[in-house]
Amino acid sequence: MLNNIYKHSPIESPLFNKNSENFLVEEKALYEFSNNGEWLILKVRKKDLTTYDLIKILSERTGAKSRDIGYAGLKDKYGLTIQYISIPKIFTKEVEKIRHPKIKILEKHIHKNKLQIGHLKGNRFFLRLKKVNPTDAKKMDKILKSFKKYGIPNYFGFQRFGKDNSAKQGKDLIDGNLVIKNKKIAKLLVNAYQSELFNKWLTERINLSNIFEEFTPKELSKEFPKDVIDFIKKQKHPFKLLQGDLMRHYPHGRDFELNLDEIERFEKKDIAPTGLLNGKKVKRASKYAGIIEEKYANYIPGRDGDRRYAWIFPEDIEGKYNEKEWHYNLNFFLPKGSYATVFLELLLNRDVSDMM
């Protein structure tokens, strides 16, 4: 279970069945389409199909090669999902003829570029939780208010790690204790290890934030330098920034080292802290933040590193309770690279992998 900065007891009553009635995700485009060019952009609604399934069907029905069909992000198989797909404009007539019980083309646009991974702003989610008792519904209402005010930690979700201890296999690959000939599988395993290091670092930072909330300066002085205590105690946000943190303009922008007079910018959601994705050619945190980051900075050869938002600010959060049906309907928007399962796990403060 993810370490939770919102220290509430687990909410046990909700149940979630991932299907087209209870789960909807809609991709939000990164930019407006140019209305000229050689690419046809399709806004597609699919049901109980993976993105790869969708691409295969489009390829078979149009004659376009799968490698020429672009997408901005992978979407879940189970549920109702809406995403953008690009296909060469020369296949427009063939696209017009497509009829499929699990696919509906909602919009068509013309654009100058093929869609690439990451070319999306984020995703809007709808989840319906069932068998929610009134007490837990009120509790979720209160927690969502905290999410709106402060945001949430940007953990990698359990989907990133696959099965069979993928993160450990990724470490074994890096250490030379495992050989995987399939490059695609090897990359996924290393990704899992990279993500595990990030999650462990984020957990330590949340633990540290909780400690500073709970103890007095006198109690903290036994373990922490005075300048760190003084700096953190000035902060109102539950996630505590440290000297040397690398911040990033939010929701996108450049990285820069935290100036000590910029705490309020984080509280106003103008900037957010970042965590390390291990690799080469990546800027590192310094000072006290760097000391903690170094614990999780295992070198990953042959891969450029990056930095990832450690904290995000979900938008359009709404929870509505149907007391008659005992249903709780959740709506929220997350930036790209963030996980609805993490949002749900933090809300319920328990493992939700068995629900998904």
Image: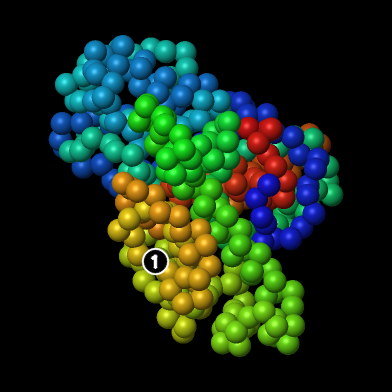
Q: Is 221 positioned to the left or the right of 303 in the image?
A: right
Percent x, y of residue 314: 53, 54
Count of marks overlaid on the render: 1
Residue at numbered disc 1: 284
Q: Is residue 4 above or below residue 127?
A: below
Q: Is residue 181 above or below residue 293?
A: above
- Nearer the observer, 311 or 297: 297
Which image quarter: residue 173?
top left
- Nearer the observer, 2 or 153: 2
For the C terminus, the quadrant is: top right
- The residue located at (40%, 23%) in the rendering is 52
Residue 55 showing in the rendered view: yes
- Nearer the observer, 243 or 99: 243
Which image quarter: residue 228?
bottom right
Percent x, y of residue 95: 28, 18
Percent x, y of residue 200: 57, 55
- The residue located at (74%, 78%) in the rendering is 215
